[in-house]
């Protein structure tokens, strides 16, 4: 069993980009916020901030309490996307990137002589040096090397920041025993509780469990896959089909009134519809998600005939908006999700559907915006939100700057 995977995790990525671009922030605690408001949460924290207990999800007000000197900076997603592409290019100078898993994670395959420990470690060091030289000294990475991608990801988390950990077949499974259950990818709070219910409280107990026990704990084949992955085996995982796409936005204090919040939703939905057409997909379900300042939430859905038409979706959004609760509590977060996705080429639109008349209009709007920039042409419902809801980066979606950028 050879070393077959190299996993790269860029440490405190958004905060590190800010420290690279702003030398005055280097060596200081930094929190990155999507909105400059005390009620929002940090979406990233530098390692200097993490030393004070500040994490992703820490409220800005709480971050200031934990670290009075923290610098809170406004997130700049387009810059993070630009740095991401530079990092991918730097890695590709030495190794093909099998898959970009998120804006700050990628996995590569090792072949031939690179499967030997000394060669793999030397390669990892070359990649780190190239990143420092070509992208920036503040862009630190933790690299994990292991017999499969799952263990390589685990290894990348074992030494931060700027770590380099190798898990060889002979190290297994003992090298994992010092980890907590939630240190393993795929085990969150709920899964940990299910494992506890099955009598598994430590990683050592997890590694010693048989396939049947893990299948029972995971209630399916995922448990069998983990059994093999923990032993360094390669496991085929069938490709997953995207089931939804959407956008959400945390509202700044001046945007929490109903009319502006609805305009922001309108803007988010127009962006989602553009992505839908770009990816050749249709949606059969529109979800509206609202979260209020008192932390209560509301959601509702509308079933649709399969469509990619912006006007049809905006009409559906209006219907959902009218169903929202009658409350005076200000909104905190709004979001739209297009679900029940299907391939446009595998489904014929009805000849009598209302939105077939809008196909030339959608094409024209998309082409103009692609050529001259996002929001050159847009539907009027989003006019009030022109300066609101800038591009955001979801965990598994790296925005296309040409398609989703705000410039």
Image (cartoon, rainbow, N blue to C red):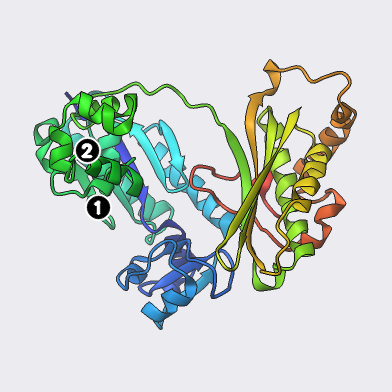
- For numbered disc 1, what is the local secondary structure? loop
Query: Residue placed at 50% from the left, 52% from the top?
Result: 83
Q: Which quadrant is the N terminus positioned in?
A: top left
Q: Which mark is residue 228?
A: none
Q: Horizontal and vertical percent for residue 178?
A: 14, 49
Residue 210, position as x, y percentages in the image: 16, 27
Which is nearer the eye, 103 or 135?
103
Give the structural element (helix, strand or loop) at label 2.
Answer: loop
Query: Circle 2 sits on which residue?
Result: 198
Q: Which residue is mark 1?
A: 163
Question: Which image quadrant for residue 132?
Answer: bottom left
Tell me which label, 1 or 2, sits earlier in the chain.
Answer: 1
Residue 285, picture quadrant? top right
Residue 78 falls left or right of residue 154: right
Which residue occupies 71% across, 69% down?
Answer: 328
Q: Nearer the viewer, residue 117 or 288?
A: 288
Of residues 194 and 350, which is closer to you in this image?
A: 194
- The quadrant in which the C terminus is found is bottom right
Q: Position of residue 324 (x, y in %)?
A: 72, 54
Instruction: Say few, some or many: other residues with alpha carbon within 10 Å of mark 1 (under 14 / 14 to 19 / 20 or more).
Output: some
Image height check: is 46 above or below 402?
A: below
Q: Looking at the picture, how far across and down is residue 236, in whole percent?
A: 34, 21
Q: CA distance from mark 1 to mark 2?
A: 34 Å
């Amino acid at each position: 069993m050879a070393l077959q995977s190299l996993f790269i995790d860029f440490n405190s990525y958004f905060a590190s980009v800010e420290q690279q671009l702003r030398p005055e922030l280097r060596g200081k605690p930094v929190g990155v916020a999507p909105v400059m408001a005390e009620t929002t949460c940090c979406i990233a924290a530098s390692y200097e901030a993490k030393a004070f207990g500040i994490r992703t999800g820490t409220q800005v007000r709480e971050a200031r309490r934990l670290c009075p000197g923290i610098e809170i900076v406004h997130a700049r997603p387009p810059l993070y996307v630009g740095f991401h592409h530079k990092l991918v290019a730097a890695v590709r100078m030495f190794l093909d990137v099998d898959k970009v898993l998120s804006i700050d994670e990628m996995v590569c395959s090792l072949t031939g002589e690179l499967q030997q420990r000394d060669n793999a470690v030397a390669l990892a060091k070359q990649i780190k040096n190239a990143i420092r030289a070509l992208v920036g000294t503040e862009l630190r990475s933790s690299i994990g090397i292991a017999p499969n991608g799952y263990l390589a990801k685990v290894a990348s988390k074992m030494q931060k920041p700027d770590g380099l950990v190798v898990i060889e077949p002979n190290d297994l499974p003992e090298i994992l025993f010092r980890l907590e259950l939630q240190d393993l990818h795929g085990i969150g709070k709920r899964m940990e509780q299910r494992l506890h219910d099955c009598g598994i409280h430590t990683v050592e107990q997890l590694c010693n469990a048989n396939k049947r026990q893990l299948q029972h704990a995971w209630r399916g084949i995922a448990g069998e896959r983990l059994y093999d992955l923990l032993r360094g085996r390669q496991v085929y995982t069938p490709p997953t089909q995207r089931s939804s796409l959407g956008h959400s936005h945390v509202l700044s204090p001046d945007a929490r009134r109903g009319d502006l919040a609805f305009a922001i939703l309108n803007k988010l939905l127009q962006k989602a519809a553009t992505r839908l057409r770009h990816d050749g997909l249709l949606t059969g379900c529109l979800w509206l998600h609202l979260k209020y300042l008192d932390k209560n939430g509301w959601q509702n859905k509308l079933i649709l005939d399969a469509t990619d038409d912006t006007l049809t979706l905006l009409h559906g959004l209006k219907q959902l908006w009218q169903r929202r609760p009658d409350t005076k509590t200000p909104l905190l977060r709004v979001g739209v999700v297009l679900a029940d996705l299907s391939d446009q080429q595998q489904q014929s639109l009805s000849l009598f559907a209302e939105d077939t008349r809008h196909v030339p209009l959608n094409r024209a709007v998309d082409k103009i915006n692609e050529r001259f920039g996002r929001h050159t042409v847009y539907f009027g419902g989003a006019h009030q939100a022109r300066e609101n809801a800038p591009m955001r980066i979801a965990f598994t979606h790296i925005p296309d700057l040409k398609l989703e950028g705000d410039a």
